[in-house]
Amino acid sequence: VNDRADGFCLHKTKYQSFGVGLPFMESDGSFRHEGDYFIMDHMERPFPQLHLRTGVGTQLTVAIADTVCPLYQYLPDGSAVDIRVAPLYQYIRDMVR
């Protein structure tokens, strides 16, 4: 969650293969190769919300403080997961609708 608590900030990503949309340029942050992984640090990319999807070969997991939720264990492959930052009252309002 970003400092204003109105979205997210991507600081770092780790991946195993190059592909369309994956960061690798110097302007994206600090790129390095460690073993089988490519790591991009110091990205500081803002996102108002996160649009994620479960998939084959991925283990989509969300961790907040000490709580870890392995979404890939609960949702079928291809499931869309949208995450946004909102005040608690909005969450409660949306749940009772």
Image (spheres, rainbow, N blue to C red):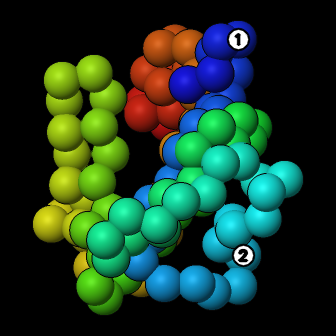
Q: Number of labelled discs? A: 2
Residue at figure coordinates x 42%, y 33% from the top left: 95
- Of residues 81 and 26, the one drawn nearer to the viewer in this rendering: 26
Describe residue 17's horizontal placement relative to residue 42 as left or right: left
What amino acid does circle 2 point to?
Gly
Residue at figure coordinates x 29%, y 54% from the top left: 61
**Where, by quadrant of the figure, is residue 18 drawn?**
bottom right
In the image, residue 87 lies at what x, y percent? 56, 14
In the image, residue 62 lies at what x, y percent? 32, 45
Q: Distance between the residues labelled 1 and 2?
A: 27 Å
Q: In which quarter of the image is the N terminus?
A: top right
* Residue labelled with disc 1: 4
**Mark 1: few, some, or many residues within 10 Å (few <14, many ≥20)?**
few
Q: Which of marks 1 and 2 is in front?
A: 2
What amino acid does circle 1 point to?
Arg
| Residue 79 visible, this orientation | no
Q: In this view, does 58 lie above or below 47?
A: below
Residue at figure coordinates x 41%, y 78% from the top left: 16
- Of residues 17 and 72, the one drawn nearer to the viewer in this rendering: 17
Callout 1 touching callout 2 (CB < 8 Å) = no
In the image, residue 55 lies at what x, y percent? 36, 82
The secondary structure type at the circle numbered 2 is: loop
Q: Residue 21 carries which label?
A: 2
**Mark 2: few, some, or many residues within 10 Å (few <14, many ≥20)?**
few
Q: Is residue 89 above or below residue 65?
A: above
Residue at figure coordinates x 32%, y 29% from the top left: 64
